[in-house]
Amino acid sequence: MKHARKVVVVFDDTAQCQRMEKELALLGTSVQAMTQGPSVFSTTFESLETSVDVVLLVSERAHLALVVANLRSILPYSGIIVMCQLGAEAQRTELLLAGADSLMPLTSSATELAAYRHALRRRVDRFLSHTAEVASSVTEQQPPSFQADSPWVLQDKGWSMVSPSGTVIELTYGEKQLIELFSQSSDGRVSREDFIQIKSGGLQSKRAVDSLISRLKRKAAELRVDLPIRSVHGWGYSFAGRINREERNAEVLSAQEEQAQLQQQIEAAWQSPAGIEGRLSLQFQSRIQLKDAVQQGVEMQLYWDGTQRIRSALLEQLDTPVAVALLERSIRMLCEDMREWQQVYRLSTSVQLSIPVNVLPTLQPILLKLLTLFAAEARNLELVLRATDLKVERDWITLCEPLRILGVSLWLEHDVEVPSAQTFGLTMLEGLRFCYPDDDQVLSDQVQQTLLQACAVASEHGFKTIVGNVWNKARRDAAMRVGTTYVQGEFMGSPMSRDGVLLGLASIESM
């Protein structure tokens, strides 16, 4: 376990870092300060002297979670403490999920930090001691009661996997995607191509798939668990066991009930003095081009209180002033993020945002002013206009031309049905987005046949197509058969934070 006893403290304030360095030295703690950026993390940490057990890393970047995630991938067994201006709960949660062990305010003293270091060291020492004890007392053969007939269980929405013997294996984002793919396979067999299709953490090659599985098996072995992933020569992998999920709590609301409850919360917040400020956040879901199985753009998703997604269908049901206020704030947040991605990280991607057609007349003037301020970012924006009734009055078409002049790409979204000739006459459109039903039921033959016709006609007219709500392998395979251009949905990857987008883009850029 290399670097197991090292503690890295990430600062977002240079002066505070210098103060802490001096105070720790007075306490007799061996310290080394770093000012290099993430691009040299790996080389720098490999060359650090083993006597240094506290590294103070200065990060002036706004996206601390991205820095922490990079550190965690390089130093999987080190303690990571972040000292910063602690913001909202969602920001603190993001830092912890990115790999931080603890968060401390900038006003913390060196004595408190030293105490955290000792706590982390005690935990590591105890873990190493416990591992040695288990290794000497446990045989290679697991007890007969823990054979293949006992299931493996996915918990915490797939972030934890419990072995038949009760050992918990915490999964990374990529590992979670791989295990879920095994659980969705009827025979437990999955090809490397299927692994690549799900985007797991930016996997774009068979070698990357092999490396990810090797790391996962090594993690399980350190916990004295034989992970039953077997290689199928020249093809892929199999999971020689049964994978179950936690049973759904009967009290959990359905998707429709959750959206109805969320609508009431938003409308009540709109009437309160505090309003909706601070309650909106953004998540992003990858869009995968099926031809090359690579990520090409993301969909922006709007969340309420960091946990509940505000879907386009819900925006249709809200009063227009409320829906416009939500969209105005979310688009401003998006443009600010996109500007930072480009100016700070030199990374950019197309981002699509779905809005209901019925709010466009009110939203359009606001949108034009906003996108004029963010002219460079507007060229990466894809506006997906959701129309539940394709026969509605088309006055909104004239509202789209000024947006096109700014460089915004326009799409039309609706449920699975064959578009009319009138729709294909809209030359301003880049393409069409079709959404599978919201439920997770098996697709009917009628839905698949309709989607095949819709994509075929769209292709004949030179339109690109997106199929959304791809939640499982069967839906992905159906989308591949109809020849759609892009697919989106939980099967292709869970929604990502802003830093998750940057990590994905950075991995693509480095390949």
Image (spheres, grey):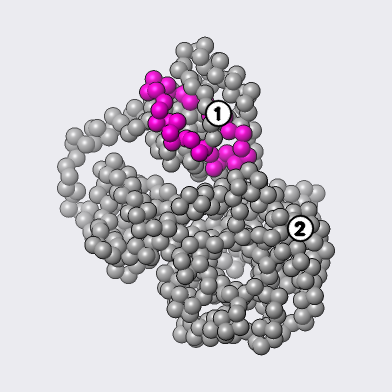
- Residue at image coords 44%, 62%: 198
| Residue type, mark 1 in image | Thr
Q: Position of residue 8 (x, y in %)?
A: 48, 29
Q: Secondary structure at mark 2?
A: helix
| Residue type, mark 2 in image | Leu
Q: Which residue is mark 2?
A: 371
Magenta-tinted stretch: 38-67
Q: Quadrant of residue 380?
A: bottom right
Q: Position of residue 236 (x, y in %)?
A: 30, 62
Q: State whether residue 241 appears in this view.
A: no
Front-most of residues 188 and 151: 188
Q: Which mark is residue 35?
A: 1
Residue 390 lies, with reference to residue 369, above or below; the image says below
What is the spatial separation of the Cα atoms under label 1 and label 2, in whole angstroms? 36 Å
In the image, residue 48 lies in the stretch drawn in magenta: yes
Q: Position of residue 374 (x, y in %)?
A: 74, 54
Q: In this image, 367 relative to 298: left or right? A: right
Q: In this image, 169 relative to 511: left or right? A: left
Q: Position of residue 268 (x, y in %)?
A: 74, 57
| Sequence-earlier tag: 1 or 2 | 1
